[in-house]
Amino acid sequence: MFIGYSEETLWSAIKKQAQEIENEKQWLRMYILEKDIDCVEDCVRNIMDSCKAIMENIENLRGEQA
């Protein structure tokens, strides 16, 4: 499937998602110390969503290179 995003846009999106993961990691450390399981779970889910978005952008980059 052709998405139509430029390679630069896809790399920019990956960079943004990586930064979001870094931010979530900071919150995750704090919530672990507080033993707040609900917030830990939310952070983990957000990190998983960001990883999924990165993988989708990688797939799109591979499609652009083909």
Image: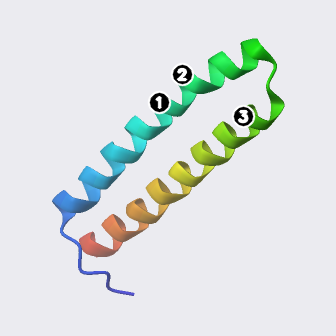
**In screen coordinates, is 45 left or right of 50?**
right
Q: Compared to 41, does 9 lie above or below?
A: below
In percent of the image, x 64 and y 18: which residue is there? 29
- Coordinates of residue 18 in the picture (x, y in percent): 41, 40
Q: Quadrant of the C terminus?
A: bottom left
Q: Which residue is mark 1?
A: 23
Q: Is residue 2 left or right of residue 53?
A: left
In the image, 18 versus 46, the foreground residue is 46
Q: Residue at x 42, y 67 (%)?
A: 59
Q: State whether residue 15 is above or below residue 27.
A: below
Q: Is residue 58 above or below residue 30?
A: below
**Residue at the spot x=39%, y=62% of the render?**
57
**Residue 34 quadrant:** top right
Picture quadrant where residue 65 is located: bottom left
Q: Are marks 3 and 2 in contact (CB under 8 Å)?
A: no
Which element carries disc 1, helix, strand or loop?
helix
Instruction: Tell me, yes or no, whether the two marked residues, 1 and 2, touch with CB atoms within 8 Å.
Output: yes
Q: Residue at x 31, y 43 (%)?
A: 15
Estimate the spatial distance between the alpha carbons at disc 3 and disc 1, rounded to whole Å. Answer: 14 Å
Of callouts 3 and 1, which one flags the residue occurring earlier in the amino acid sequence?
A: 1
Q: Secondary structure at mark 2?
A: helix
**Residue 13 % position (x, y):** 31, 54
> Mark 2 highlights which residue?
26
Work out whether mark 3 precedes mark 2 in sequence or the reverse, and give the earlier one.
2
Residue farthest top in this picture: 33
Counting other residues with Cα less than 10 Å from the Cα at mark 1, is it few (<14), some (14-19), or many (20 or more)?
few
